[in-house]
Each structure stands twice: as structure tokens, then as C-alpha cells.
Image: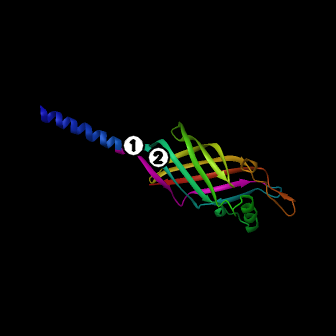
């Protein structure tokens, strides 16, 4: 009878141990397939600047191949890694981003709320050109063989972060006030 109880206890402990292991929170790192882009308009043409040089970490809990918790998420992007197809445009963008003093663009998660199996509402602090602002971001998530993919975007303005819309050719070309920040994040173990 005693050995039966011990065996039952051992089975319960092993099942509990396996369940705990399967749903344990793990730390993930941003990989080199991650992409960021800034999309805007001007009186001359629409434009886009891109980067894949972000670094970051996140703590996720995945249970039965489903993302169940986003505990933390932090991303840093070297501001001068964002490039367009024109060096002159890059120079104007870096002046606007104040990269002489503000080398990085940062995001730090404050909270995450699950909307459904693949959608989350993230609240976090964006720091751009030295100005921090809390924004909500809706992201689509997917579990991959290596980790977690997150895709989303935010609409912001230059004014939101204390920046002036760039101009060129003595003000004859003006950048629109509205910007879209897009990201495709890949976090791996």
C-alpha cells in the first residue's frame, strides 16, 4: 500500500514537473530576420526608410504552441541604421532624429493584453529623438519553429516626438506630418 502511494505521488510530481516545464517562461532574443520601416509622404513622392539592425529581448510563456503571456519586451534600434535609397534623404532624416545626441530609438513594453489567439494589444514606451511617449500597438503573433513572430504598426506624427517635418530645396519639398512605423519582429530562443 505504501509503495502504491509513493508511485502515485511520483507520477503526480512527474506530470506536474512536465507541465511546468512545457509552460515555463523563456527569454527570447531578436534575430537578424527582423525588419523595421518608417513610411511617409512628401510634396514630391511617398517614401520609406528601412532597417534590420535592431536588438532586443523578450520573455514569453508558450503553452501547447500558443503564446499565453508576454512578460517583457525591449527593443533598441540604432537610428542611423534606418536607410532610404538616397543618402541626401538619410542625412535630413538623421538631423530630424537628432542622431548627433540621440543614437538610438527604443521601445519598452509596459503591459500586454491578449485580444485573441493571434492578436495582442501592447502598451509601451517609444523613445524617438530623445522624447518618450506611451503608445498602444496592436500586433499579430505567430509561433514559429524557432520562437515568436510579431507584426504590427503605429501611426505617429513628427510633433508627437518633438521633431519638425523635414524640408528640402529651400522648403519647396515638404514632408507630410504623418508617419507609419512598421515592424516584423522575430524572437528566437
Q: Is residue 170 left or right of residue 55?
A: right
Res 102 → quadrant: bottom right
Q: Secondary structure at mark 2?
A: strand
| Above or below: residue 43 compared with residue 61 | below
Which quadrant of the figure contains the C terminus? bottom left
Q: How many marks?
A: 2
Which x, y percent locates residue 118? Answer: 53, 41
Which quadrant of the figure contains the N terminus? top left
Distance between mark 2 and mark 1 Cα atoms: 10 Å
* Residue drawn where x is 34% and y is 41% of the image: 19
Q: Nearer the viewer, residue 141 or 177?
A: 177
Q: Of all residues shown, which one is farthest toward the top?
A: 1
Q: Nearer the viewer, residue 151 or 74?
A: 74
| Residue 101 image label | none
| Above or below: residue 80 compared with residue 38 | below
Q: How is the image coloured?
A: rainbow
| Above or below: residue 81 compared with residue 178 | below
Instruction: Name the residue that disc number 1 marks.
Output: 23
Q: Secondary structure at mark 1?
A: loop
- Mark 1: give few (<14), some (14-19) or many (20+) Cα within 10 Å: some
| Above or below: residue 68 compared with residue 38 | above
Q: Is residue 88 left or right of residue 19?
A: right
Q: Nearer the viewer, residue 32 or 133?
A: 133
* Mark 2 or mark 1: whose residue is earlier in sequence: 1
Indicate yes or no whether the magenta region holds residue 36.
Answer: yes
Q: Of all residues shown, which one is farthest toward the front?
A: 101
Instruction: Name the residue that disc number 2 marks.
Output: 60
* Residue drawn where x is 58% and y is 53% of the image: 184
Indicate yes or no whether the magenta region holds residue 134.
Answer: no
Which x, y percent locates residue 61? Answer: 44, 44
Q: Of all residues shown, which one is farthest toward the left?
A: 1
Magenta-highlighted residues: 21-41
Amino acid at each position: 500500500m505504501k509503495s502504491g502511494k509513493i508511485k502515485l505521488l511520483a507520477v503526480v510530481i512527474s506530470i506536474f514537473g512536465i507541465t511546468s516545464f512545457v509552460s515555463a517562461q523563456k527569454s527570447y532574443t531578436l534575430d537578424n530576420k527582423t525588419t523595421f520601416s518608417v513610411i511617409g509622404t512628401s510634396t514630391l513622392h511617398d517614401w520609406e526608410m528601412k532597417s534590420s539592425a535592431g536588438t532586443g529581448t523578450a520573455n514569453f510563456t508558450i503553452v501547447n504552441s500558443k503564446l499565453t503571456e508576454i512578460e517583457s519586451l525591449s527593443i533598441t534600434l540604432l537610428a542611423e541604421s534606418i536607410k532610404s535609397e538616397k543618402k541626401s534623404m538619410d542625412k535630413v532624416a538623421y538631423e530630424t532624429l537628432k542622431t548627433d545626441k540621440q543614437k538610438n530609438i527604443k521601445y519598452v513594453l509596459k503591459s500586454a493584453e491578449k485580444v485573441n489567439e493571434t492578436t495582442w494589444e501592447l502598451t509601451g514606451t517609444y523613445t524617438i529623438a530623445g522624447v518618450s511617449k506611451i503608445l498602444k500597438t496592436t500586433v499579430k503573433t505567430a509561433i514559429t519553429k524557432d520562437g515568436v513572430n510579431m507584426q504590427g504598426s503605429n501611426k505617429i506624427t513628427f510633433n508627437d516626438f518633438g521633431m519638425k517635418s523635414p524640408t528640402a530645396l529651400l522648403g519647396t519639398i515638404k514632408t507630410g506630418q504623418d508617419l507609419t512605423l512598421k515592424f516584423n519582429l522575430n524572437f528566437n530562443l
